[in-house]
Image (spheres, rainbow, N blue to C red):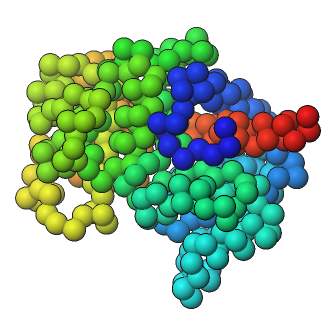
Amino acid sequence: MKNLLSAGQLSGAQAVEILDIAEGMADVNDREIKKLPTLRGKTVVNLFFEDSTRTRISFELAEKRLSADVINFTAKGSSVSKGESLKDTAQTLEAMGADAVVIRHSASGAANVLANSGWINGSIINAGDGTHEHPTQALLDAYTMRKRIHGSASMGKTLEGVKVAIVGDILHSRVARSNLLLLNTLGADVHFVAPPTLLPSDSSNFDAKLHYSLDEMLLKEQPDVVMMLRIQTERMNASFFPTEREYARYWGFNAQRLGQLKKSAILMHPGPMNRGLEIDAVSADSAQSTVLEQVANGVSVRMAVLYTLLSGERNANAS
Ligand code: CP
């Protein structure tokens, strides 16, 4: 595998292998010296045209823990603000010898354009493109579910039969799209829960069961996992619900809904959270919340992705 552009490109075996490698990386991250020489001599560029906290920092940490040389590029403060195109930016990075480019962009398909353009010879990793995909988020979410459900016996396991409710702004969510693809591959039972205005118009084509009432869904289905999504006001060009207060009342996760969850169920959120809108503080900070676990697991999973894409290339070149 050269690039990671979509969660849907991974077979079940490939996805499980990445999750298993991430378990090994988590052991490294628990050591006093959290460093492997795997990517020594490799240059990885983090090319962020859109804001990020978790993804950008965890990729940087993952690259450094694998001993890569790391270049951080953000559109703000670069020649992009003077009008430089994606092509010229990419070719500049190629001239500097980038072995891999981690790209986040507001345009859906930007990572695919870069991978198929011929402007860059190195690996391309999609770190979130518009409303399209966020495959490493889906992998770290799957890792978190697997770890919580199977514990120390999770190596080699899928998510067969695990019931996952993805709740909220599905229409604008690359996290929902990548999770749906990966969860289907891993055998999970996926449920979308949202007001009709926040579901894509073609959602009948998705392999997910649809629900229009969060309370009914929680009561009837008793999910193993509830994944709350951020309301993405920055991608909204219309009014999708009457008021924030009404959204929080009908669609937000709160202490009362937390009380309805079975005790073994987990509550996820990819971050950043709008506290008080899609999730309240009691739920976000509860023992059933995996919000910070997801962030920590993101480093191990991104190390596993970099290892999978780049160390294989070294082995192939050596042979
Ligand atoms: N989950 C996620 O992608 O967060 P950031 O936007 O902070 O990277």
In the rendered image, which quarter is residue 120 located in?
A: bottom right
Residue at (12% x, 45% y) in the render: 196
Question: Can you name the residue that lies furthest to the bottom here?
Answer: 82
Question: Can you name the residue that lies furthest to the top here?
Answer: 153
Residue at (27% x, 18% y) in the render: 262
Q: Is residue 259 left or right of residue 158?
A: left
Q: Nearer the viewer, residue 205 or 166?
A: 205
Where is residue 276 shown, x and y percent of the image?
Answer: 24, 51
Q: Is residue 101 left or right of residue 128?
A: right
Q: Is residue 172 left or right of residue 85?
A: left
Residue 136 seen by the camera: yes
In the rendered image, which quarter is residue 241 located in?
A: bottom left
Residue 281 seen by the camera: no
Where is residue 185 shown, x and y percent of the image?
Answer: 45, 25
- The quarter of the image holding the C terminus is top right
Residue at (73% x, 49% y) in the render: 63
Where is residue 190 shown, x and y percent of the image?
Answer: 31, 27
State whether residue 94 is above or below residue 319: below
Residue at (37% x, 18% y) in the render: 162
Q: Nearer the viewer, residue 137 or 253?
A: 137
Where is residue 310 shown, x and y percent of the image?
Answer: 75, 43
Q: Is residue 137 left or right of residue 219?
A: right
Question: Can you name the residue that lies furthest to the right here?
Answer: 318
